[in-house]
Image: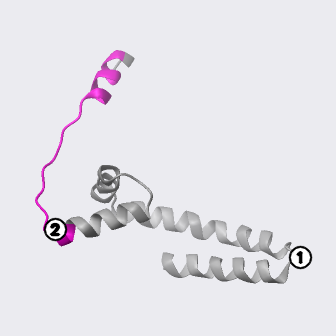
Amino acid sequence: MNSTQTDQLSKKKKSIRITLSLDEYQILMEQALQQHCPLNQYISHKILDDKLGVKLLSDRIMQMMPLFYNIIAGINDTSIRNELTEFGGAICRYLK
């Protein structure tokens, strides 16, 4: 496939229409706001994501946590170090 064909394919879009209750819509809107992204982008991520994708991302984040804790260990301010350690623990709990 040449670059012109690739460009043409990337410009084509399809839409999917779904019907939600007002409560379901509100939930999706709140979740999108929490993720700081537009509703259509949030829904696309939710639809296209699969367990393997979520697991892969979770594993990558968990692999970075030792580095995070090593960086924290170098912070002299005990208060900041403790807050960041708690924050790292919260991240790990969310990923389990």
Percent x, y for residue 93?
53, 82
The amino acid pointed to by label 2 is: Leu
Instruction: Inspect the magenta stretch and tell me whether residue 5 lies in it.
Output: yes
Image quarter (top left, top right, bottom left or bottom right) of the N terminus: top left
At x 34%, y 16%, the residue is 4
Q: Nearer the viewer, mark 2 or mark 1?
A: 2
The amino acid pointed to by label 1 is: Asn
At x 19%, y 38%, the residue is 14
Instruction: Inspect the magenta stretch and tell me whether residue 31 lies in it.
Output: no
Residue 22 is marked as 2
Q: Quick one: 43 or 23, which is closer to the camera?
A: 23
Percent x, y for residue 50?
33, 61
> Rounded to the nearest whole Å, what is the CA distance between mark 2 and mark 1?
50 Å
Q: Quick one: 68 or 30, which is closer to the camera?
A: 30
Magenta residues (range): 4-24
Percent x, y for residue 31?
36, 66
Disc 1, SS: loop
Percent x, y for residue 84?
70, 76
Circle 1 residues within 10 Å: few <14, some 14–19, many ≥20: few
Residue 76 is marked as 1
Residue 64 is marked as none
The answer to whether 63 appears left or right of 41 in the picture is: right
At x 30%, y 52%, the residue is 44
Q: Earlier in the sequence, mark 2 or mark 1?
A: 2
